[in-house]
Amino acid sequence: MSSTDFAQRLVQALGPDTVATAEQDIAPWLSDWRGLYNGRAQAVVRPRRTEEVATCLALCQQAGVPVVPRGGNTGLCGGATPDQGAANVVLSLDRMNAVRGIDTIANTLVAEAGCILGNLRRAAQDAGRLLPLSLAAEDSSQIGGNVATNAGGVNVVRYGMARELVLGLEAVLPTGEVFHGLRTLRKDNTGYDLKQLLIGSEGTLGVITAVALRLFPRADVRSVVLAAVESPAQALRLFELLYAKCGARLQAFEYFSGDCLDLVLTHAEGVQEPFGQRYPAYVLVELADSADDAALNALLESVIGQALEDELCLDAVVSASLAQLQGLWKLREEISEAQRADGPHLKHDVSLPIERIPDFMASAQARLQAQFSGIRPFIFGHFGDGNLHYNLSRPAGAPRDWAATQGAAITDAVLDEVNRYGGSISAEHGIGQLKRDHFLHSKDPLELRLMREIKRLVDPAGIMNPGKLL
């Protein structure tokens, strides 16, 4: 069957309002937001109901047509971008954006996959609850994509990854069968937890159409401190103290180097120098609770006072107002945009055993400087859960095509160091196209074999998101 004939079958089954086949209508769906990947497709399908997703997948399965599920297109690894196969069908969940229910007794939220994460967080807040999954792209990313990539974010140290927030899933398998796992039970010991196969599978096993999520009490009382530290090792000693003294109130523990702060102060608007002098590195700590402001501030000031006495940090400033709290967070949140303004750079989203982070940072820096003299590291990340964004910029005066010509060798060196320390080459961004080769070379052979066997069982025709992950 020709692609034209198959596209017309989709139109006949789902309607012209659901299926786009014209070249100009398909074009916006063929690239990732960073512009790194561009693919091809014969059609874009935008269903409104789970039954329409099932119809689309059943037809694609029968004809052997590849399907590329797409959420908010905020991913950084090309996981939602089709490859160069002209037969691809892009399946967007953006029209499936209904909140099916919020239960403030069971503390659950059920939403369709196309719901914007930020909108769900606000819906939970309006209901007097907290959905803790929080990302820089939360006002664009969709919850189905968040779950399909097992998203992380700034609150992982307290609430865990997306995987730990999901109670149940509804999904459509490649056959068109609907997996009715949209349960809100906290306890269900009835065999294999099949939803966990779909979480983090990046659309390679099926299409998530709805999710049931855990909600938590609103933690509206927040207090933030920016602490200056002399080294990653000192930052981890500070984390150990904060974790022991503050317990579950510790919501974020973010590290960034002094070079990152320099970059933000150079390129970002509306930011202020936090101290009277510069320091080697900084840690942004947030506590959150339902208690009163005075109690939380007193706790944080007491712990930071002890940290200063015990020489676990060099200096510290505690937020005294909401504006100051937001200003301190801005120093951390503007790093990516500041590096973008600085010029071409390489991103590495990795995780490590937390206690090995200082050793990794030292050896990776030595290795890179020996092989690529003048390279500029801009390191930040979620230190409390072991996630580093190990970003690298070109040496001063290097040509703008530096990342294109040197990137592969540099990434090989970085990820080799990550593997040497028992870390992961992808902490929260997934594998997609970007890290597929490294994933296949670094993953344990038994794990890869089991993953391939699961893939063959669930998707024997291999139509789901070709060229990604496996």
Image (tube, rainbow, N blue to C red):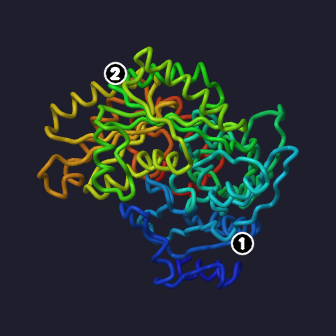
Toward the top, the furthest residue is 310
Answer yes or no: do the residues labelled 1 and 2 have beta carbons within 8 Å?
no
Q: In this picture, is 189 found above or below 175?
A: above
| Residue type at the position of mark 2 | Asp
Q: Can residue 470 be seen here?
A: no
The residue under the point 28% across, 36% down is 278
Q: Position of residue 317 (x, y in %)?
A: 45, 35
Look at label 1 and name its amino acid. Answer: Arg
Which residue is under mark 2? 359
**Farthest left residue?**
397
Q: Position of residue 192 (x, y in %)?
A: 75, 35
Compute the Cα span from label 1 to label 2.
50 Å
The residue shown at (46%, 45%) is 328
* The N terminus - image quarter: bottom right
- Please state if 233 lies on the left or on the right of 267 as rendered: right
Rate crowding at label 2 as few (under 14), some (14 to 19) or many (20 or more) other CA atoms within 10 Å: few
Q: Is residue 236 left or right of residue 17?
A: left
Q: Secondary structure beneath disc 2?
A: helix
Q: Secondary structure at mark 1?
A: loop
**Residue 76 seen in this snapshot:** yes
Residue 49 falls in image quadrant: bottom right
Q: Mark 2 or mark 1, which is nearer the start of the sequence?
A: 1
Q: Would you identify the image quadrant in which residue 175 lies?
A: bottom right
Q: Is residue 408 above or below residue 69?
A: above
Report the mark closest to the observer, 1 or 2.
Answer: 2
Image-based side of 229 in relation to 75, left or right: left
Where does the image place residue 134, in percent across and percent down from the top left?
A: 59, 48
Q: Name the residue carrying label 1.
A: 48
Q: Is residue 398 left or right of residue 431?
A: left
Give the residue at x 55% y 69%.
Answer: 89
